Amino acid sequence: MIVKMKFLSITGPKDDIERMARRYLSKYEIQLENALTELRTVKNLRPYMEGNPYEESLRSGREYLPAKGLPSEVKNEEMMPREAEEVIQKVGERICLLQEQKTALTEERKQYALNMEKIEPFQQLPYDTHKILNFHYVKFRFGRIPREYYEKFEKYVYGNLNTIFYITHSNQDYVWGVYFMPASLSSQIDAVYASMHFEVIFIPDEYEGTAQEACNRLHEKLKEIDGKIGEIDKAIQDEVAGNLQELYDAVNCLEEVERNFGIRKYAALTRERNHTFYILCGWMTQKDADAFQKEILNDEKTFVVVEDDHDNVFSTPPTKLKNPKLFRPFEMYIKMYGLPSYNEMDPTMFVALSYAFIFGAMFGDVGQGLVLLLGGFALYRMKGMALAAIISCAGVFSTIFGFLYGSFFGFEDTVIHHIWLRPKEAMTTLPVVGQMNTVFVVAVVFGMFLILLAMIFHIMVSLKNKNAEEAFLDTNGVAGLIFYGALVAIIFLVMTGHPLPAGAILAVVLGIPLLCMALKEPICAWFDKRAKLVEGGVVMYVVQTFFEMFEVLLSFFSNTLSFVRIGAFAVSHAAMMEVVLMLAGFENAGGGNWIVVVLGNVFVCAMEGLIVGIQVLRLEYYELFSRFYKGTGREFKPYQLKKKES
């Protein structure tokens, strides 16, 4: 069923909106609408534009909280935003001091690591690096050269150049080292090395001893700095741990403020004398609206106006479905097609009963039905899947029809005896038609009943919406119901051998409804006293109406005939299981291969179960929904003021 909705306008002093939201709206579900849009006839409205003053504090508080090990619940639920801000600020000041120390150490470590990276490739140089850096008459360059260029340099250039290249390290890509040269020839030799893509590395001169000794000292320094950084991290963790509960409560408080603050974008402001008021508009369920109004009776700062007439509201009421727990999983099929609009009927219960019933008729087997029933139920309990619950419900009717057909895992009238009939063998003799499978006949009769029921639903919805044209003259209205009902009655009389009423009576019963459907447009125009009864001329209207009526008659026939598939799948299921038993060697009631029986049942249950499920859904959507249901509603989406439970 569709929950009844109320449209509320909430107003109060501008500075009281946060208190109102926290105290009242957090308890109820409300779908907020933009007040400026809803109250477009009210003058002197302006948007509520204001920044959240606690945004920065909340961001800092979230950064301070650890990813794991948070408290299980909020202890100080009464904490005020200002108090929460002070808690975060107090913790933040101590953490900021530690963070500054850590930043300074990190920068220092970065410099040492850079020096380490420069010196490390030259550890094999057995000379005091500091002394080399102070040479005056001999020039030098530390650096590296790509291996391919070094091989060319060594083979073609090195022997003819006044330089010494001392290799300190190498890998498959580069050769590191230092080259020495006379100061007087430095320009020429530098040019030769540069042509070989030699990259100069500048070595810091603050270290005494060899490169190996400098690396050892740098390593110790890095280790010392890492230890200090670790101590600071531990101090930060201890600071957070010592104030964890208080910090968690503060962040929770500001998160609630942030959620409540978001409602300002839906609000409008208005000014009366020297006071500024906010206005919020939205949809609540009638139950929540009544409870909300009752709660604010003694609140002098909060006022609520409930608009009972939805025609005075610009936005359409949202749809919230509320069905018994047994039928709730079938809401999935309704949402797939489209939620009902607020003034439509909720077809969930109808779909639940008809879908499960038709599925059972098409897939009647006690054993396989129990598998669907128990398997779907178990999957629903473990995973909460709506589809699993639907399968379980369908399994109930599959089991029932299995008893009616006498089928147990494909064994017909062997394990259990049929109560009603065997789908493959039951035949009925009909006048004019001759012999026909009984299941087909019953399926068509059942389809006629569902089509008539869908027409009644259409009439009910049209009358609810005060649409007389749709209720009485539509092909699915009273005219269509009388016409199709009369056809059903005539077919029933013919097939049961009863005499038909006089031709004049039949002409009236069939002709008047058909004429009403054909002349719907001019009849409605005449009642509304429009200037033109027929648009486009009489001839064009007659031609158009002829083809429309032909399409209506054809749709009645095709829709009715479409229900033959119920019987067809019932027979098909029995035939497929008979093939499985034949392959297993059970056709003559003798022994057979049970492995083939099991695998065959699994295959049929999976494949045919899927196909039947789709075919039943097709019947629901195309043969029934098309007659009374539009599915143009919008879902009720309450503004999230309360924190979602994890």
Image: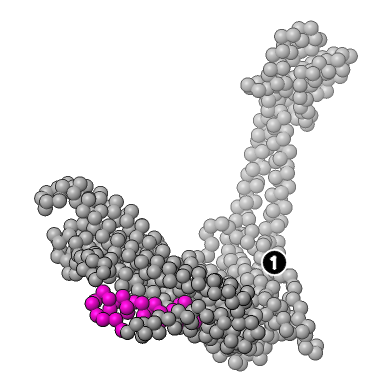
Magenta stretch, main secondary structure class: helix
Q: Specify the quadrant that holds the N terminus.
A: bottom left
Taking the view exactly as shown, the residue that stands out farthest to the bottom is: 298
Q: Nearer the viewer, residue 187 or 612?
A: 612
Q: Nearer the viewer, residue 54 or 3?
A: 3
Q: Where is residue 137 in the image (x, y as percent from the top left)?
A: 86, 16
Q: Is residue 495 magenta?
A: yes
Q: Where is residue 213 in the image (x, y as percent from the top left)?
A: 68, 27
Residue type highlighted by circle 1: Glu
Taking the view exactly as shown, the residue that stands out farthest to the right is: 184
Q: In the figure, is residue 600 to the left or right of 236? A: left
Q: In the figure, is residue 636 to the left or right of 494? A: right
Give above or below for 292 relative to 634. below
Residue 488 visible in the picture? yes
Which residue is found at the position 52% from the left and 73% from the top? 545
Q: Position of residue 52 (x, y in %)?
A: 71, 70
Q: How many marks?
A: 1
Which residue is found at the position 37% from the left and 79% from the top? 485
Which residue is found at the position 73% from the left and 38% from the top? 111
Q: Does the magenta stretch include residue 169?
A: no
Question: Which residue lies under the disc numbered 1?
Answer: 55
Which residue is found at the position 49% from the left and 79% from the top? 517
Q: Which of 510 and 405 is in front in this view?
A: 510
How are the colours assigned in the image?
Answer: one colour
Give above or below for 150 relative to 605. above
To which quarter of the image does residue 187 belong? Answer: top right
- Helix, strand or loop at label 1? It is helix
Magenta span:
473-501
